Amino acid sequence: MKTSLFITLLVSSFSIAAQTPNGQKTFDPEQNLRTLGNLSPLSVGAIGFDDRYSGIKGTPLLFTTWQWGTIQFAKNDTMSAPFKMNIDLVKNTLIVQLRNGSLGEITAVNVKKVQFKSEADDTSQLLVASEKAVEGKNSVRLKFYEVFYDGTMRLLKSTDKQFKKADYKGAYNSGNTYDEFLTEENYWLSVDGKRFEKVKIRRKEIETVLAAHAERITELSKSNKLNLNELQDVVQLLGLLESDGKN
């Protein structure tokens, strides 16, 4: 009964357009979000636990706290109004917090990219692409990839979450006594629009993928004091190499 009431109230809140004091309808960002993103009420429920073990570690979400972000929908070229959001990396859905505190989810198929802005005024951007396009898998499943460089060369990061059940036997006296979300992070580098290569942020691997630029990489690393074992320096290197191509 409580679940039905929750969903009814949530859907009802979507159907009421914002109005001015004289009764005229105005633009409602939440209604626009529902229309363009095919927003649906978040399923109510949680993973059940056996009270003999310790519970669960980790989270299926990308961020530990809600982040302000904007969305570019698959059918739109502009960004949405800002909302508090997070990303469920198990279901690959965007979770949106609405004004009344209720939650809605948007599937990856309805999203082109998302941009988050932290309290420190840092921005991060994620795009939606298939595993086949980025990781070369025989899978068209859509995922959210964090963008670190997006030009002729592209550097993306995938973050995957997997749910691992507790490992116990009999009286729960062996193995882990908790369920856990495991996190796996990988970087993907593409050069000149060619297929992505899986890389670690290590000088040797970066130089291997960018072998055609080996001499220039040596020059730029020395003149700019770049440490290609650091992500920010790899991003700077890609920008410098791209600038070379534009001169």
Image (cartoon, rainbow, N blue to C red):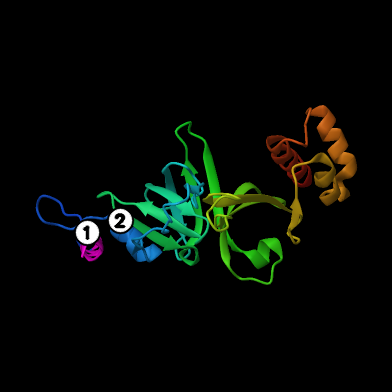
Q: Is 175 situated left or right of 103 in this image?
A: right
Callouts 1 and 2 close, C-beta under 8 Å: yes
Q: Name the image quarter holding residue 137.
A: bottom right
Task: Specify whether residue 155 is in view.
Answer: no
Q: Nearer the viewer, residue 38 or 63?
A: 63
Mark 1 to mark 2 CA distance (whole Å): 9 Å
Q: For mark 2, what is the residue?
A: 30
Residue 195: give its label: none
User: What kind of residue is marked 1?
Assistant: Ser
Residue 61 placement (x, y as % from top left):
49, 50
Q: How many marks?
A: 2
- In the displayed structure image, the side of residue 138 where residue 71 appears, left or right: left
- Say if the magenta span includes residue 128: no
**Placement of the N terminus among the 4 image quadrants:** bottom left
Q: Which residue is mark 1?
A: 13
Q: 53 or 218, which lies in front? A: 53
**Residue 93 position (above or below residue 58):** below
Residue shown at 87% from the left, 50% from the top: 212
| Viewer can see residue 128 | yes
Query: Going 44% across and 33% down the picture, which residue do you hit?
Result: 119
Q: Which residues are magenta?
A: 1-14
Q: Is residue 128 left or right of residue 25?
A: right
- Tag 1: Cα neighbours inside 10 Å, few (<14), some, or many (≥20)? some
- The percent position of residue 25, horizontal first and vertical second, equals 18, 58
Rendered-image quadrant of the C terminus: top right
